[in-house]
Image: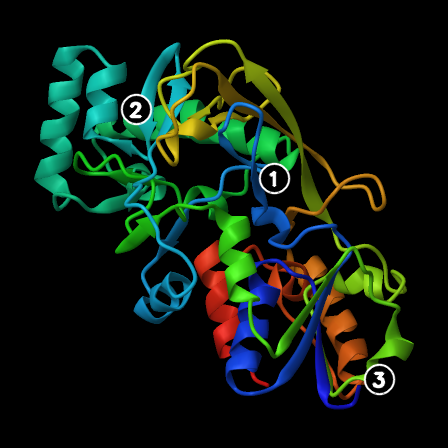
Amino acid sequence: MKNINLIVGAGLSGAALARRLADLGEKVAIIDRLPHVAGSAFDYKDENGITVHKYGSHIFHASNAEVWRFVRRFADFNAYMHRVLALIDGTEAFIPFNLNTIKKVFPASLAERLEKKLLEIFPYNSRIPICEFQKQNDPDLKFLAEYIYEKVFLEYTKKQWGLDSVDSGVTARVPVVIGTDCRYFRDAYQGIPLKGYTNLVENMLDSKNIEVRPGEDFGGVGECAKYKAVYHTGSIDEFFGYKFGVLPYRSLRFEHRSLDMEYFQKNSVVNYPCNYDFTRIHEFKYYLNEKSARTSVMFEYPQSFEPGKNDRYYPIQSDENRALHAKYLGEAEKIGNLRFFGRLGDYKYYDMDKAVERALTLKL
């Protein structure tokens, strides 16, 4: 097998790299411990005829034209533009917080005053972090900053990350949109594959140079010598038996429900920043505009990650954790033909476009 490249993990990162290598004429075997391809982007048709995203909503968005051209080789996409509602003081309003949200949650006179002051200071359609409002002397803008921080960001982040407080460096990235653009993403290219993400990945792996082996786990360090190169998208700490300790993550629990009603909510995703134990509810039929008398929804609950009990979703970034990851990278470098990449290998959260970009630019 010395002429074969092995990729561990058949999610979007692994599949993109497999296709890149196959297009270069390289022989590739790709394995995954799951019984299916597509990893966390896996979707399927349920009993209602609705395409369900098993591991939470996935919306493809990209600004990189090369990435967009690459995925379009393997699927046709619709022009879905993602919008997110949040329950704010009992009112459903779009986030990121924008001029429409201001009019929705505040009395008309206050909303008009806030909008006027914002447009006097900031360019229209700009995205301003909360910290910029905290630098203002105007009491109305200070009130707005605190309102958004408390009602939209603080409690949601505490639930999501299991923290009692929120780091000021994180709040600096929370924007207010000085305009009426309610889209969650501003990327030039956005959409959902018309036949689903699983189909997209299956098409990506459809090559005479690629052998796909779902339901197969990697044997460990000793297996590396059998292959020309091993590209691993799994958890690097688990691979090395947690010899330096466990890399911390946040996990998620999903509760799927099939309901005897046409629609459950007004939008594909509704966030609950300050209410209930779940952070958001997904309703999948919106993504591909699928028609059914029934609907399929999913409640999303954040939880701590426990090895062997649940799945890794969000790496908890800190200097200490990055140093721990670097130790594991040092171990990997001792094995000449082993490379880690992807969300778990790099210990970074990647949107799908960034996962593809990483695979397309990985040094071979």
| Distance from Cα at disc 3 to Cα at disc 1 | 33 Å
- The residue drawn where x is 72% and y is 84% is 4
Q: Residues within 10 Å of mark 2 (few under 14, many from 20)?
A: some
- Nearest the viewer among 26 and 275 is 26
Mark 2 vs 1, N-terminal side = 1
Q: Is residue 244 visible?
A: yes
Circle 1 sits on which residue? 55
Going by the numbered disc 1, the residue's amino acid type is Tyr
Q: Is residue 362 visible?
A: no
Q: Residues within 10 Å of mark 3 (few under 14, many from 20)?
A: some
Report the side of 262 relative to 328 (left or right): left
Residue 217 placement (x, y as % from top left) = 82, 61
Mark 2 vs 3, N-terminal side = 2
- The residue drawn where x is 56% and y is 48% is 41
Q: Is disc 1 placed on a helix, strand or loop? A: loop
Residue 141 placement (x, y as % from top left) = 24, 30
- Nearest the viewer among 161 and 210 is 210
- The residue drawn where x is 31% and y is 41% is 80
| Distance from Cα at disc 2 to Cα at disc 3 | 63 Å
Q: Residues within 10 Å of mark 1 (few under 14, many from 20)?
A: some
Going by the numbered disc 2, the residue's amino acid type is Phe
Mark 3 vs 1, N-terminal side = 1
Circle 2 sits on which residue? 143
Q: Image quadrant for the N terminus? A: bottom right
Q: Nearer the viewer, mark 2 or mark 3?
A: 3
Residue 290 placement (x, y as % from top left) = 39, 29
- The residue drawn where x is 30% and y is 67% is 65
Going by the numbered disc 3, the residue's amino acid type is Lys
Circle 3 sits on which residue? 226
